[in-house]
């Protein structure tokens, strides 16, 4: 799937979707929101191989390691996060904030 303009392929892990649902619950129609979002964002699956790879690392933020393993398995080129510090501990993928990424488009 590609972004609305079709020039960028966007992906999010299933864990990201679950975290968003928890944060947005009761604030918006999450079913409608995710139906719209999945029209242009590819949702990457998570499985036990990613969990096993994450368990092999001792890092400050385990959830970030799960996200990283999902991005690697999904052949992502970059990780976009507001938590660059924790990803910098282990990521061999480029890490950018959303503002940094959007300013480069």
Image: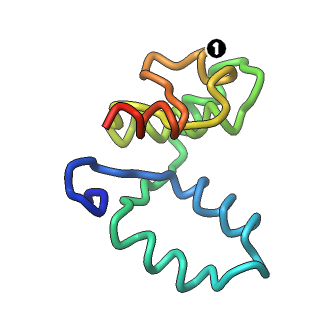
x, y (%) of residue 89?
64, 14
Task: Indicate the quadrant where residue 92 lies.
Answer: top left
Residue found at x 68% / y 81%: 28
Q: Which residue is mark 1?
A: 89
In this view, the residue farthest toward the left is 6
Left or right of 38 in this view: 48: right
Task: Indicate the quadrant where residue 75 lies.
Answer: top left
**Label 1 SS:** loop
In this view, the residue farthest toward the front is 103
Residue found at x 77% / y 22%: 60
Task: Indicate the quadrant where residue 19 lies.
Answer: bottom right
As drawn, 42 above or below 78: below
Left or right of 4 in this view: 6: left
- Number of callouts in the render? 1
Q: Quadrant of the N terminus?
A: bottom left
Residue found at x 62% / y 25%: 84
In the foreground, 67 or 83? 83
């Amino acid at each position: 799937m590609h972004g609305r303009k079709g020039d960028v392929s966007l992906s999010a892990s299933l864990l990201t979707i679950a975290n968003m649902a928890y944060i947005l619950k009761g604030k918006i129609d999450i079913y409608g929101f995710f139906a719209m979002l999945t029209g242009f964002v590819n949702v990457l699956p998570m499985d036990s191989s990613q969990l096993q790879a994450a368990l092999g690392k001792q890092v400050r933020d385990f959830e970030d390691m799960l996200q990283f393993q999902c991005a690697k398995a999904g052949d992502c080129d970059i990780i976009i996060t507001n938590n660059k510090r924790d990803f910098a501990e282990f990521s061999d993928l480029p890490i950018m904030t959303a503002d940094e990424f959007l300013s480069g488009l």
